[in-house]
């Protein structure tokens, strides 16, 4: 059996009594009663319609993305921004393909055609000549 002191017991007893008083004050609050009533009604509705809580959250985020984005929950804020940025029904969410760029090195006359800027040779040129020089060496393909 673990050894506990009488002082520790009375300290914990005092904490329990204080928490009990705070809980009783909360239970007297009309605002809390109202919120608890909404919670109970919501749980009953979810059970009645066999809806998962996550489905309800997703629906609320889709309907009110601006309101949910202001909450302190990072998950809800992320979901809200995703819902707000998603295209309206019937519109395509596919981004257009990148245009090809032709880079021509004026020092060596070497030409590279690429859609991205993370090309091995471009990175070498960037190290050798600098980004400012590369910004003047490209043009879009037709």
Image: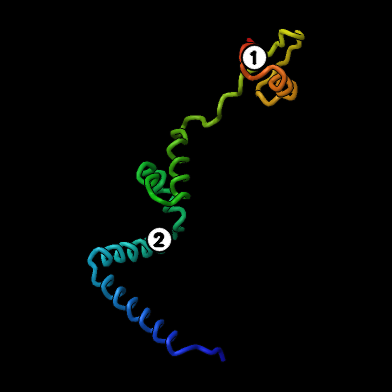
Q: Say which mark, if any, is on residue 133.
A: 1
In this rendering, the answer to whether 2 lies above or below 132 is below
Viewer-side residue, 61 vs 48: 61
User: Residue 3, image x and y in percent?
Assistant: 53, 90
Percent position (x, y) of residue 52? 46, 58
Earlier along the polypeptide chain: callout 1 or callout 2? Answer: 2
CA distance for labels 1 and 2: 62 Å
Instruction: Examine the rendered structure and indicate whether residue 87 appears above or below residue 15.
Output: above
Secondary element under disc 2, as helix, strand or loop, is helix
Q: Residue at x 41, y 46 (%)?
A: 61
Q: Quadrant of the C terminus?
A: top right
- Decide: is 36 above or below 72: below
| 19 horizontally vs 123: left or right | left
Q: Which residue is mark 2?
A: 46
Q: Residues within 10 Å of mark 1 (few under 14, many from 20)?
A: few
For this rendering, which residue is in front, 115 or 3?
A: 3
Q: Quadrant of residue 48?
A: bottom left
Contact? badges 1 and 2 (CB < 8 Å): no
Horizontally, is 95 left or right of 36 in the view? right
Q: Secondary structure at mark 1?
A: helix
């Amino acid at each position: 059996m673990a050894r506990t002191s009488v002082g520790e017991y009375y300290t914990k007893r005092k904490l329990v009594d204080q928490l009990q008083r705070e809980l009783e004050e909360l239970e007297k609050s009309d605002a809390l009663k109202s919120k608890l009533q909404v919670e109970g009604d919501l749980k009953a509705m979810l059970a009645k319609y066999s809806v998962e809580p996550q489905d309800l959250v997703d629906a609320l985020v889709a309907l009110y993305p601006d309101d949910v984005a202001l909450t302190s929950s990072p998950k809800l804020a992320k979901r809200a921004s995703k819902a707000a940025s998603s295209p309206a029904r019937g519109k395509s969410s596919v981004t257009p393909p990148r245009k090809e760029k032709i880079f021509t090195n004026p020092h060596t006359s070497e030409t590279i055609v690429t859609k991205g800027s993370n090309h091995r040779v471009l990175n070498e040129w960037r190290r050798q000549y600098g980004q400012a020089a590369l910004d003047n060496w490209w043009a879009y393909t037709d």
